[in-house]
Amino acid sequence: MTSLDRRRFLQLSGLASLGALAGCSRGSPTIGPIPDPAAAIVTRWRADRLARGSYSYLSLDSRPGDRELLAAPVGTSLFFAGEATSSSNPATVHGALMSGRDAASRLEAVANRGASVGIIGAGAAGIAAGRRLVDAGFGVDIYEARGSIGGRVLTDVSLGVPIDLGASWIQGVAGNPLSVIADSIDAPRIRTNWDDTRTYDVGGDPVGDRFWSAPTRTVNGAARQGLTIQAAIDDALVGRSQEYVGQFEFAVVAEFEHEYAADVSMLSAEAPHEGDYFGGADVLLPNGYLELLQTLTGGLDLHFSQAVERLAWSNDGVTLSFARTESTHDHVVVTLPLGVLKTNDVVFEPSLPAEKIGAIERLGMGLLNKVVLEFPQVFWDQSVDYFGYISEERGKWAQWYDMEPVTGRPIVVAFNAGSVAEALEAMSDEEIVADAMDVLRAIYT
Ligand SMILES: Cc1cc2nc3c(=O)[nH]c(=O)nc-3n(C[C@H](O)[C@H](O)[C@H](O)COP(=O)(O)OP(=O)(O)OC[C@H]3O[C@@H](n4cnc5c(N)ncnc54)[C@H](O)[C@@H]3O)c2cc1C
């Protein structure tokens, strides 16, 4: 996929080798040279024209009810789904899935049997809407600009094992509709634990874990105090030592900015209180997330490499224009990502109602990117699920996940979010990987 600009590097040479000499260990498990990665994949979700970001968040400008405005049908012909329309489970795969089912139910309530339905987008929302409508007897065509289903569920196999470059976790397995799908195909799942982590300071020394609770309390308490999150943090950090500030900011990044894919300075104080959570563990899918969506596609009419450019709608129907063709349907379900709706890449004629446009403008589209690194062998600490790094530059390379137990290969994944991720996207893959290697060498050499 060129749009994601992911590349495989074989035998990366010339990358930073500064830390390659054996040095003193400061509590990290391995002493010795850290090898260059044998392969790397870098995601760029902001640059991806079919996503234009990772997932939505409640911004400082958001108003209560914005997600409902985004989800609201327009007349009887246009229906909306997608993670950003979900007020119960935004920014998740299960939220997208449920929003697709909800849009299908709304459509069924007004449509004549036998009506023709077009769906724009074959991500979780589009596939779920299509499944429900086909099962209810509607004729459904799903138009997808990419060459395959999934959207922001993107399982890459270029390393020879499934690696999820978009969504990775089923977040909360208890009662989650994704668990029902995973059970139906007996998909293996691996429980992970966010609390199972070790954090290292800028020089690579492990720091204790007593610093987590104050930042969490501060961010969660901002709304109650009538403050923005940033103002609450600023108050909490007055007169504190540099070390305290560094650990506090790190916890804010790891706990909130990676969760909401945006700097806390951009987040509404309501963001941490938005929506519901399924209980139970978070799990990873060793066979890849995509197979969950694939199980829903039986009998669906999927049209790939069909980018909708224009959508002309009235209550009599909707005409979709593509580069060379058109198709007309009685009803259309739009599952375009919020990031795409924020652009003029798809033209609505007439334009959408002002209140929906307002919601599109106010909601934020965040950024979370991954860097996947495969090495000749594991050299990182495997006694924890995650490790964290308090870098000099706030939030950079803050979280890393050990993928060896999931893939059986010496693979580690780094996460960056918000403005840090935006800045990294502007760098070349070689520069990004070299920067990541500086961190691994700081910790493990
Ligand atoms: C890096 C990352 C990590 C994430 N981690 C998790 C996680 O661990 N757990 C979790 O639950 N969620 C996670 N998410 C969020 C989750 O992936 C999304 O919420 C969900 O997949 C969105 O589904 P959707 O159907 O709303 O949108 P999409 O999957 O984006 O589907 C929309 C579809 O529309 C298509 N499209 C765009 N423009 C056009 C056009 N003009 N014409 C036709 N088709 C078009 C796109 O190609 C896409 O396939 C993550 C996302 C990212 C990016």
Image: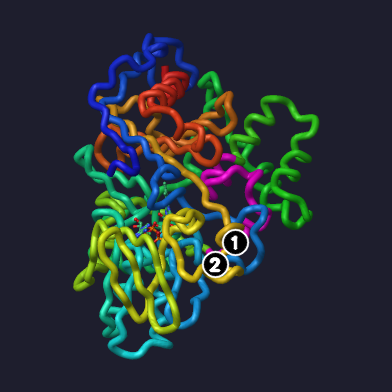
Q: Where is residue 257 in the image (x, y as percent from the top left)?
A: 56, 44
Sequence-wise first label, 1 or 2 = 2
The secondary element bearing badge 2 is classed as: loop
Q: Say which quarter of the image contains residue 357.
A: bottom right
**Front: mark 1 or 2:** 2
Instruction: Point out the image quarter for the N terminus.
Output: top left
Image point (42%, 61%), residue name? 336
- Quadrant for ligand 1 reads bottom left
Q: What stretch is highlighted in magenta?
A: 253-276
Q: Identify which residue, 433 or 240, lies in the foreground.
A: 433
In the displayed structure, 275 sits above or below 47; it is: below
Q: Does the magenta stretch include residue 285?
A: no
Asked if disc 1 and disc 2 are in contact, CB closer than 8 Å, the reply is yes
Q: In this view, does 132 lie above or below 164?
A: below
> Which one is in front, 393 or 378?
393
Seen in the image, is 124 located left or right of residue 280?
left
> What residue is shown at x 48% (from left), y 21% (from top)?
27
Kind of residue sitting beneath label 1? Glu
Does residue 387 lie above or below 361 as drawn?
A: above
Q: Position of residue 214 (x, y in %)?
A: 69, 42
How far across and down, in percent of the image, does residue 276 sit?
54, 65
Identify the residue position indicated by label 1 in the image. Answer: 274
Residue count near mark 2 (Cα–Cα under 10 Å), binned few <14, some 14–19, many ≥20: many
Q: How is the image coloured?
A: rainbow
The quadrant in which the C terminus is found is top left
Q: Residue 87 carries which label?
A: 2
Q: In which quarter of the image is residue 376?
A: top left
Secondary structure type for disc 1: loop
Note whether residue 161 is visible: yes
